[in-house]
Amino acid sequence: MKKCIIAIAIMIAFGAAMMMGSGAIAQTTKSGDVKDTMEIKDPLFKKHKKAAVKFTHKQHSVDLKVKCDDCHHVYKDGKNTWKDGDKVAKCSSCHTSPTKNEGKTLSLKNAFHKNCQGCHKKEKKGPTKCNQCHPKK
């Protein structure tokens, strides 16, 4: 009987740990609750040629102290007017073409690459090569 109770307790603990995994809220920000880990994946891409990037918000914003407006932006007259507490829009709400730049607006693919790779190269930290961000499917 004791072994049965211990086995059930272990299964409950394991199940709770799984539920708290990648979808768990990592932060509560002025702009809302943010999951710890998210896949950068958008339905604007009809077919994904590479695996989605797994992004850890807490690692970037808390551990690495990346400022919110380094990633989140709303441009007016050439300046980023987005501030902590503003609504966070999906990138594809402005970057509406998956692969072609439209005037001054980068394609969604180019916007992600410029923002992420650009920062990693500038800071000389983090992945910069395709397979470092996009794992094999």
Image: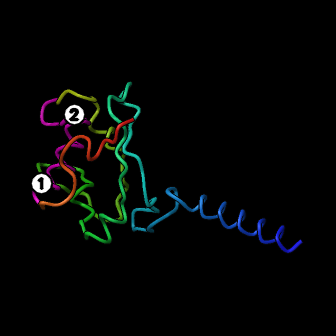
Residue 17 within the segment the image draws in magenta:
no
**Of labels 2 and 1, the one closer to you:** 1
Residue 89 in the image, given as x and y percentages of width and height: 36, 48
- Left or right: 133 with respect to 19? left
Q: Which mark is residue 102?
A: none
Rendering coords of residue 50 (x, y %): 32, 33
Dot label at residue 107 = 2
Mark 2 belongs to which amino acid?
Ser
Residue appearing at x 47%, y 62% in the figure: 33
Count of residue discs = 2
Q: Quadrant of the C terminus?
A: top left
Near-viewer residue (55 or 28): 55
User: Depth check: 4 or 53 in front?
Assistant: 4
Hey, which quadrant is residue 65 in on the image?
A: bottom left
Closer to us: 47 or 78: 47
Q: Quadrant of residue 100?
A: top left
Please state which amino acid type lies under the numbered disc 1.
Lys
Q: How busy is the neighbourhood of tag 2: few (under 14 within 10 Å), some, or many (20 plus)?
A: many
Question: Disc 2 vs disc 1: Cβ atoms closer than 8 Å?
Answer: no
Residue 41 image position (x, y, % from top left): 38, 40
Q: CA distance from mark 2 to mark 1?
A: 20 Å
SS state under label 1 = helix
Looking at the image, residue 135 lies above or below residue 27: above
Q: How far across and how far down the image is residue 78, in percent? A: 11, 49
Label 1, on which residue? 121
Q: Residue at x 38, y 37 (%)?
A: 42
Q: What secondary structure characterizes most of the magenta part?
A: helix
Q: Secondary structure at mark 2?
A: loop
Image-based side of 125 in relation to 3, left or right: left
Span of residues in magenta:
102-122
Callout 1 crowding tier (Cα within 10 Å): few <14, some 14–19, many ≥20: few
